[in-house]
Image (cartoon, helix red, strand yellow):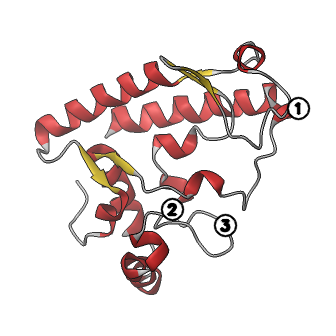
Amino acid sequence: MSEYHALLAKVDAFQAQAEVAQAPWLTCKRGCDGCCRLRRTAWAVEINHLRAHIQTLAAERQAELRARRHDPPVVAGQRCIFLDANGSCAVYAARPVICRTHGPAVQTDRGTSWCHLNFVGLTEPEVAQVPGVLDLTRLNTLLSVVNTRYQAHHPGPARQPLDAALDEEKPI
């Protein structure tokens, strides 16, 4: 898990710099939850990290989160299971890497992408030149390596739905 925590620290530091560099074009803020509207999966190492965080929450809060498994918008994949009614994240401190990289522009092997609410009026070539664009392909490769190392000692499915973090198993 120490490799995962080190990766999270690097991602958070990079994203903080990207948010400053891209500030003129970003509209993201607490409660902006457009990126939390799709059904998500996470790597096993991330699920374990989430599970450990959830188990530090009050029993009532854990029960509330588990009850969301039956919430129609969650079941239909229209909203993340950890999205609170006020648009904030119930597990923000332990959110997966994909959630940490929303907002600022990212680069993948398919091009540059960003939330439609950000970079209004800019074209893809213009956004690609903005400072602080994250190479998401490279990050996902690093995360895959960290997960593979984690799974060498903790076998199971490589990717799991986010609600697997609500299982009452003990985190590793």
Q: Residues within 10 Å of mark 3 (few under 14, many from 20)?
A: some
Q: Residues within 10 Å of mark 2 (few under 14, many from 20)?
A: some
Q: Is residue 51 left or right of residue 65?
A: left
- Mark 1 or 2: the one toward you: 1
CB-based contact (under 8 Å), mark 1 and mark 2:
no
CB-based contact (under 8 Å), mark 3 and mark 2:
no
Q: Which mark is residue 24?
A: 1
Reply above or below: 126 against 85: above
- Residue pointed to by mark 3: 87
Reply above or below: 88 against 7: below
Q: Is residue 110 left or right of residue 21?
A: left
The quadrant of the image that shows the N terminus is: top left
Q: Locate residue 54, reporting x and y percent.
A: 40, 67
Q: Is residue 150 left or right of residue 29?
A: left
Tell me the amino acid under the disc marked 3: Gly
Q: Locate residue 111, reporting x and y percent.
A: 57, 18
Q: Locate residue 42, reporting x and y percent.
A: 36, 47
- Residue pointed to by mark 2: 91
CA gap, disc 3 and disc 2 = 12 Å
Tell me the amino acid under the disc marked 1: Pro
Q: Secondary structure at mark 1?
A: helix
Q: Residue at x 45, y 47 (%)?
A: 96
Q: Residue at x 60, y 51 (%)?
A: 35
CA gap, disc 1 and disc 2 = 28 Å
